[in-house]
Amino acid sequence: MFLQCTKDKAAPIIPPPFNICDSINPVSYSDDVVPILNDNGCFGCHSSFALPFFDDYSSVYTYRDSILLTIQHDPSLSPMPQGMPQMDDSLIAKVQCWIASGAPNN
């Protein structure tokens, strides 16, 4: 929270809310999310070698929240892609916005 410094007592200054998803075009599962996961090696392991398997939309949808946390390198989970630096913030934002919009199969 930000506070204004004046002699008069005033209400705290609250910055306007900013939703990153407002600045990103609607995110498509097939056009955005699949290429992000594919280009970063997610399907290379999670389609045949390591659980959970991300063979189709349904499985990605089921694990969407865990996927987001792992690509954000949340300390409570193993960071993904494994052994790689964190994905670019713009890619993570697309996944986050796809989830925020209900994770549609589009």
Image (tube, rainbow, N blue to C red):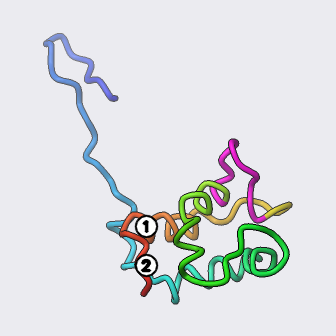
Give left or right: position of 12 versus 94.
Answer: left
Q: Is residue 73 magenta?
A: yes
Residue 102 against residue 30 in the figure, above or below: above
The image quarter containing residue 2 is: top left
Q: Quadrant of the N terminus?
A: top left
Give left or right: position of 95 versus 87.
Answer: left
> Which numbered tag is attached to residue 44?
none
Which residue is tagged 1?
97
Residue 10 against residue 56 in the figure, above or below: above
Q: Is residue 35 magenta?
A: no
Q: Nearer the viewer, residue 23 or 77?
A: 77
- Label 1, residues with CA under 10 Å away: few <14, some 14-19, many ≥20: many
| Residue 59 placement (x, y as % from top left) | 59, 75
SS at badge 2: loop
Amino acid found under the numbered disc labelled 1: Cys
| Residue 15 placement (x, y as % from top left) | 28, 41
| Residue 5 placement (x, y as % from top left) | 27, 18
Q: Residue at x 71, y 68 (%)?
A: 52
Question: Decide: marks 1, 2 in contact (CB < 8 A)?
Answer: yes
Q: Quadrant of the C terminus?
A: bottom left
Residue 67 against residue 40 in the figure, above or below: above
The image quarter containing residue 82 is: bottom right
Q: Nearer the viewer, residue 24 or 77?
A: 77
Q: What is the CA distance from the residue labelled 1 to the residue labelled 2?
A: 7 Å
Q: Nearer the viewer, residue 75 or 57?
A: 57
Part of the protein shown in magenta: 71-81
Q: Residue at x 76, y 52 (%)?
A: 78
From the image, give the main secondary structure of the stretch colored magenta.
Answer: loop
Amino acid found under the numbered disc labelled 2: Val
